Image: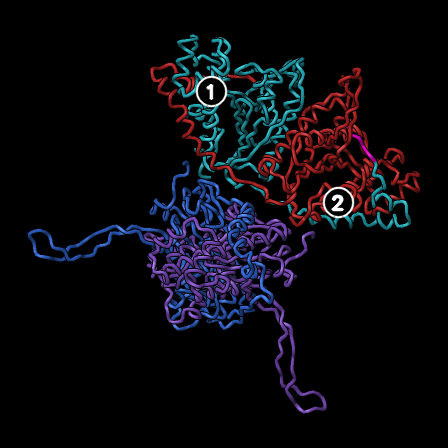
Chain colours: A cyan, B red, C blue, D purple
Amino acid sequence: MLSGKACRLGGRLRSCFETPSARLFISSSNMAKSKFEYVRNFETDDTCLRNCYIVVRLDGRNFHKFAEQHKFTKPNDNRALGLMSRSARSVMEELEDIVIAYGQSDEYSFVFKRTSTWFKRRASKLMTHVASQFSSSYVFYWKEFFGDQPLLYPPGFDGRVVLYPSNRNLRDYLSWRQADCHINNLYNTVFWTLVLKGGLTTAQAEDRLKGTLAADKNEILFTEFDINYNNESALHRKGTALIWEKREETTTKRMKLPNEEEKEVPITRSRRRVEAYHCDIIGDQFWEEHPDILEDDNC
Amino acid sequence: MLSGKACRLGGRLRSCFETPSARLFISSSNMAKSKFEYVRNFETDDTCLRNCYIVVRLDGRNFHKFAEQHKFTKPNDNRALGLMSRSARSVMEELEDIVIAYGQSDEYSFVFKRTSTWFKRRASKLMTHVASQFSSSYVFYWKEFFGDQPLLYPPGFDGRVVLYPSNRNLRDYLSWRQADCHINNLYNTVFWTLVLKGGLTTAQAEDRLKGTLAADKNEILFTEFDINYNNESALHRKGTALIWEKREETTTKRMKLPNEEEKEVPITRSRRRVEAYHCDIIGDQFWEEHPDILEDDNC
Amino acid sequence: MLSGKACRLGGRLRSCFETPSARLFISSSNMAKSKFEYVRNFETDDTCLRNCYIVVRLDGRNFHKFAEQHKFTKPNDNRALGLMSRSARSVMEELEDIVIAYGQSDEYSFVFKRTSTWFKRRASKLMTHVASQFSSSYVFYWKEFFGDQPLLYPPGFDGRVVLYPSNRNLRDYLSWRQADCHINNLYNTVFWTLVLKGGLTTAQAEDRLKGTLAADKNEILFTEFDINYNNESALHRKGTALIWEKREETTTKRMKLPNEEEKEVPITRSRRRVEAYHCDIIGDQFWEEHPDILEDDNC
Amino acid sequence: MLSGKACRLGGRLRSCFETPSARLFISSSNMAKSKFEYVRNFETDDTCLRNCYIVVRLDGRNFHKFAEQHKFTKPNDNRALGLMSRSARSVMEELEDIVIAYGQSDEYSFVFKRTSTWFKRRASKLMTHVASQFSSSYVFYWKEFFGDQPLLYPPGFDGRVVLYPSNRNLRDYLSWRQADCHINNLYNTVFWTLVLKGGLTTAQAEDRLKGTLAADKNEILFTEFDINYNNESALHRKGTALIWEKREETTTKRMKLPNEEEKEVPITRSRRRVEAYHCDIIGDQFWEEHPDILEDDNC
């Protein structure tokens, strides 16, 4: 616990209350505050350029160590991935205007629509709020994914903001992150297969993979371990894309209409909710199937 | 839970594994990634100007509602204030180079020393990491302060970065925040005394205080409720300043020295730890008593 | 002229040359410089976001006074407008990647193509070079437009940089400037017609125009002075757009081909040169007729 | 000259005047403008951090070639240096709040006082105005320094803004520029002495100087050419510092006092003017002799 110590001699503010000049002081406290208010002018305006997509990306801090200490399974821990996406969903539900989020490993990217005026487009507010909401959610929902296994300490994430002026640029950003997911997951899959099933030490596995291309890695999996990488979990190979979808929801309500008996009446309403996809977002198909995510370029 | 849906038709990446061109694809995945990597050049450099104090301030999002829902006591809830300071301490212990933090109500300011090179002084990294560590700590330590009362949802904080070139500017910033604490706490103290002890409605109390100066508020407390505001809790009147202090710590260890019996030997070592102060930081005394917080201006 | 004064006592650097330690000093002058070089790290990176049009706009400083002192004709001085466009052409010929410039009154806007890497897209370099080249050209070409009328003092311009992510945004920017030209020129045309032909004082003319709409102004010109505003000079009504155009240029060269007499041979080559347009750039026609100015949005 | 071409078919704006809908259009021209005005929001705020010195440095563009073409004398051309300082003085007289300027070779640095609010401290305005005023002055005053030798084309300068939070940082910046002047001028002096007096080719001179320290260069000058570098022109060795100085100026005016004959009366008044110094500004002496240049750090 914090140890609260009183000032040894008492500060100027405090002691003046004990003297006849106390009232003098008090009546001038607003004046005192206004004397300091000039410091507000040192804040800089970091408004994001209009008509650009605003991307906030979070990365786990020291997650290698965090994964060790919390015994994450190798090469992927579904509980950890689930918790990341649960936290990302919490961010999307809290902040308006996020049209898509993409996550893999210990990172998550959030894309605000180009016309968003959320937080007046102030970069610092956008990224700190995302980082904060994500982090508090990570601890809050831990138990849903890890059950009785305790969280040993509060984890940290850092973030950044990047702007993309065109749909092409934004899609290339997301493609870049998914290509990264693919490369890392293929490597990790082979690496841990060599270690866990092939009996190699981690040093031997590292050695074995030095200089190999993706094709070589695929070959090792297939010929030595009878694993078709393509049949591995889409969650691991593709990461997770979260988008908003409208659904019709039908509930019933007990109502009494005129000249009728009271009865159950079905009520259908359209609700927006966050859906998760584990599929390719590099090609055109995903975007053709979800035309509402991106806005027109020439606006 | 997130609902994971497989892509209906499968993305381009996935399907190509099922064809003879799979290897072709795989061997070019690194190439594919490098094709997208140009998007990194859209990141902007937000390095903080050298030789300036870097202040990160966090503010609670919708904490009025959060306080209501978690039944915070009025006008101050010591559990909530304690949790804020506990989370701030977690930030100080995690991030290097924070020389002082000051908090009151639902806000906390963190001051990095002017020569800090933490995160290469990148503003976005500094503020998101502070926001993240603070928020995850807030949830993590909730139980220490609120016991069995459950946290209903993960709270959010937003942040900003401000630079101060001189010691005077930095001290005026902290003075501004403490003057704000004073003004708000005096108002809230009188307001809730009028309501809780004086039997006024909140509307009546608001009316009663309209246009009053600090002196008037002090007078109301003293003449009507026999309360000397100056005797109220320093934690509430002054907020909390966290600084690093060196302490001698003496422990004992069982040792066996040559030609002696094994015995308890006292071991003293100097340890840096975070200490909390609830005192005036506007005047010179606090700064004279802690000369290590600020660096020389002309460096 | 500047009066150069020697330091009264001589600086440290100078005097040390006169002592035996001179060589010590000299051999350490590189070291001395490197000791100061840390100050370079105070420069900030102001790279313009990629894939956006970069617009640099210049505005004359105190040109109202400058126009008075150099007896510019009212409401428009063709010499002054010609000099502005001549200076703008000098900028376009000096800096690569400007695809269009638009000027009116004492302002000129320069548009760099979205993929430009000129000056590594550093905003400060781009705008200062434009401001500098424009200003030196203004003085340099003064005589071409004002003949023997002397330039009384060196004029100043200030500038700014604005980024536009889409073709629509850029065209709207240029439309905004041309709409401004139209509104000002209509006002000025009526105002000075009332004064110069109608015999009103400037105060009376101002009064007469207070609250009038464009239609009213047009009406005054037509019914009272028999002027059809639409027949006024396009240069004044539309301002000036400068763009690059390819032209075939045919010159002749005296050559001796084998087995022939020496003779004049026509040589045709394609040359890019700056052309000026005084036409509407708000509608689509201008852009359809010059499809090379803008690049595709989705790149 | 610019070739002004009319649009072939006339733009939308123009042609509508010829139809009955002309008035409709005209009355909506203000509306049209306001439709485009959203583009102003794309401007970013580039206000300089308060309480920091603002340094604008200009550098000549391609001045190596410019010097060749205008036959500047080697290693220093006093006319060119004089013109640089004359232009710098013009900048100081035009822009408020410049407390010192320092120039050498084809560069000049201008220092705005830390409390300056000129142009609301907007970086883009400050640097473009300095670049513009300097460049137009360079052409304007050319004749004063180069007489009948014509200026062949308008020269260009580029600029940048750097902020310095403390007096130490600012002085180190200026020291860095003067150390640069010293190193370059020593090199150039020896190099051109070897060429012009020693009969070496430029390649030979370059070779001879490769790897030499300052002491070696000084030695060459002294033993081979009997030149004491320290006796070389201070203008070349130290560059030029321009500062404001107050002077008493006494003039006489013919006045008639009561009960006296009309007579010449001396009138003394204090005037601020720009003075040039060619002395060491690295050591303390210059700053002690001119205590008004810098403001106190802790303000």
**What residue did someone put label 1 on?**
A279
Q: Position of residue D41 (x, y in %)?
A: 54, 46
Q: Position of residue A86 (x, y in %)?
A: 60, 21
**Depicted D235 relative to depicted C118: above or below:** below
Q: Along the line of sight, which residue is nearer the eye, A64 or C216? A: A64
Name the residue nearer the viewer: A144 or C30. Answer: C30
B172 magenta-colored: no
Residue occupying the point 43% across, 20% down: A210
Under mark 2, the amino acid is Ser
In the rendered structure, the answer to whether residue C296 lies left or right of residue C8 reads: left
Q: Spatial distance from mark 1 to mark 2, Cα to Cα?
A: 53 Å
- Chain letter of the residue beneath label 1 in the structure image: A
Which amino acid type corresponds to the residue marked 1 in the rendered image?
A: Cys
Q: In the rendered image, is residue A182 in sight?
A: yes
Chain for disc number 2: B
In the displayed structure, D205 sits above or below B250; it is: below
Q: Which residues are magenta?
A: A1-5
Local SS, label 1: loop
Tell which of B103 and B184 is nearer to you: B103
Q: Is residue C133 visible?
A: no
